[in-house]
Every structure is written in structure tokens, then in C-alpha cells.
Image: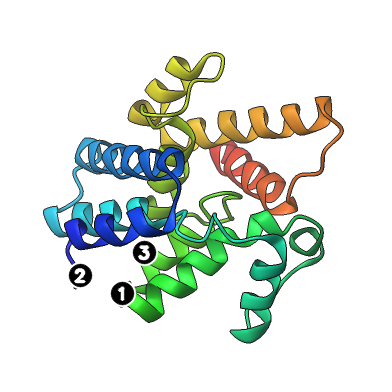
């Protein structure tokens, strides 16, 4: 498998400085959370790779994103067709599988790092939380609260983050992907069992 250092060097040629620094921050957060949840050294390193490469398609334009999906037989749903920026996780997952040999668990975490999904794995949960709370570039209001929560309870953290995303979308008259609402409802219902 390609080393983390080689992936970093390649990523520098793809992303702007801010997105690259964010990706490093996500990788570091993935490492800390993986250790917090006692993942093996191998799983921690796999998760770090996924965290590093999760936004590797973020630089693509809407047109490039749609074309990539068409050319590679990736399904685009209605919301993604309206907001092609949501496709970057799906595209990055596909690229990582084909170019670097990332396994399914890594690729699925990358694919769903923006929206979440029902039945999230620990890889999905850690990458989702790391993307929203990494320490290098995330500086929104109450970020320290959102950074602390995943160390106690990943599900609670995801619910809080999705609540924040939905609330922000409603306040600003923007749409959000229904997978986020499904993820939130799934986690809430599971907590009540």
C-alpha cells in the first residue's frame, strides 16, 4: 500500500493549501479518535489514510464531478445533481479504490464523510466527526464542544453535528442531503432502544 508520506506528496499537487492543511488535520484527528477507541495499529493507519485522502476530489468543478460520475458509472441522485459538490466523497472513494487500492471499509468512510449514512461503521463515524472537528482549519462557533464530544460518544457527536448542519441549512434557506436526516433519525431511534 502507498505510504502516508507518498499520499501527502501527491495530495499537495492536487489541493490548494487550505484544503491540504484541512486534510492533514482530518488525518490527525482520525489517528487520535482511533486510539481513543482502541483500534488496532493497522486499522488506525488505514483510517489515517482515508482521512488524508477524503477530500482529494474537492477541487473538481461541478461539470468535472458530474462527468467523472458518468464516465465511471457512479450513481448521482437528485440532490447531488443539484449540488454536485456533494459528489466529492463518492468520487474520492472511487479514485482511492482504483489508484491506491483502498479497501471497501476505507472507501465507504470516504464516500459518506459529508452526509453520514444509516448503520455507520466505526470508520465512518470517526472520519465523519474528524472532518467536522479537526483542529487545523475548523473554527466555527462552539467548535471546542463539538471537538470534545466524539471522544465520549461518537453517535451523540454525529447527531449534534447533523443538527448543526440542518439548522444552518434551514436558517440560510439551503438544501441538505436526505442521507443526513436518515442518519440522524437512525442514530436517535437506536439510542431509544
Q: Indicate the quadrant where residue 97 lies.
A: bottom left
**Which residue position is annotated with label 3?**
106
- Tag 1 and tag 2, C-beta contact below 8 Å: yes
In space, the residues marked 2 and 3 are separated at their CA atoms by 14 Å
**Which residue position is annotated with label 2?**
2
Q: Residue at x 74, y 61 (%)?
A: 80
Q: Residue at x 68, y 82 (%)?
A: 70
**Which residue position is annotated with label 1?**
100
Q: What colour scheme does the image use?
A: rainbow
The answer to which of 120 and 175 lies nearer the viewer is: 175
Instruction: State the image coordinates of residue 85 (x, y, percent, origin top left).
Output: 66, 55
The answer to which of 51 and 105 lies nearer the viewer is: 51
Instruction: State the image coordinates of residue 49 (x, y, percent, origin top left).
Output: 28, 57
* Nearest to N terminus: mark 2 or mark 3: 2
Q: Is residue 167 left or right of residue 160?
A: right
Instruction: State the image coordinates of residue 62 (x, y, percent, origin top left).
Output: 71, 61
Q: Badge 2, how many Cα within 10 Å: few under 14, some, many 20+?
A: few
Q: Residue at x 19, y 73 (%)?
A: 1
Q: Is residue 167 above or below residue 90?
A: above
Q: Residue furthest right?
A: 173
Instruction: State the image coordinates of residue 33 (x, y, percent, origin top left).
Output: 28, 38
The answer to which of 120 and 30 lies nearer the viewer is: 30
* Nearest to N terminus: mark 3 or mark 1: 1
In space, the residues marked 3 and 1 are separated at their CA atoms by 11 Å
In space, the residues marked 1 and 2 are separated at their CA atoms by 7 Å
- Any mark on residue 112, and which? none
Q: Which secondary structure, mark 1?
A: helix
Q: Indicate the quadrant where residue 75 lies.
A: bottom right
Amino acid at each position: 500500500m502507498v505510504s502516508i508520506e507518498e499520499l501527502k506528496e501527491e495530495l499537495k499537487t492536487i489541493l490548494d493549501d487550505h484544503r491540504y492543511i484541512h486534510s492533514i488535520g482530518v488525518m490527525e484527528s482520525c489517528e487520535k479518535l482511533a486510539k481513543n477507541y482502541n483500534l488496532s495499529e493497522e486499522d488506525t493507519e488505514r483510517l489515517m489514510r482515508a482521512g488524508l485522502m477524503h477530500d482529494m476530489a474537492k477541487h473538481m468543478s461541478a461539470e468535472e464531478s458530474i462527468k467523472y460520475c458518468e464516465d465511471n458509472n457512479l450513481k448521482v441522485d437528485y440532490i447531488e445533481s443539484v449540488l454536485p459538490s456533494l459528489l466529492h466523497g463518492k468520487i474520492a472513494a472511487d479514485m482511492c479504490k482504483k489508484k491506491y487500492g483502498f479497501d471497501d471499509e476505507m472507501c465507504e468512510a470516504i464516500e459518506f464523510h459529508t452526509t453520514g449514512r444509516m448503520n455507520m461503521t466505526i470508520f465512518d463515524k470517526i472520519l465523519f466527526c474528524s472532518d467536522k472537528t479537526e483542529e487545523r482549519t475548523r473554527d466555527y462557533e462552539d467548535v471546542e464542544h463539538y471537538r470534545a464530544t466524539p471522544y465520549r460518544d461518537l453517535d451523540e457527536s454525529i447527531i449534534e453535528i447533523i443538527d448543526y448542519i440542518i439548522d444552518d441549512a434551514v436558517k440560510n434557506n439551503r438544501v441538505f442531503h436526505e442521507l443526513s436526516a436518515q442518519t440522524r433519525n437512525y442514530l436517535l431511534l437506536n439510542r431509544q432502544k
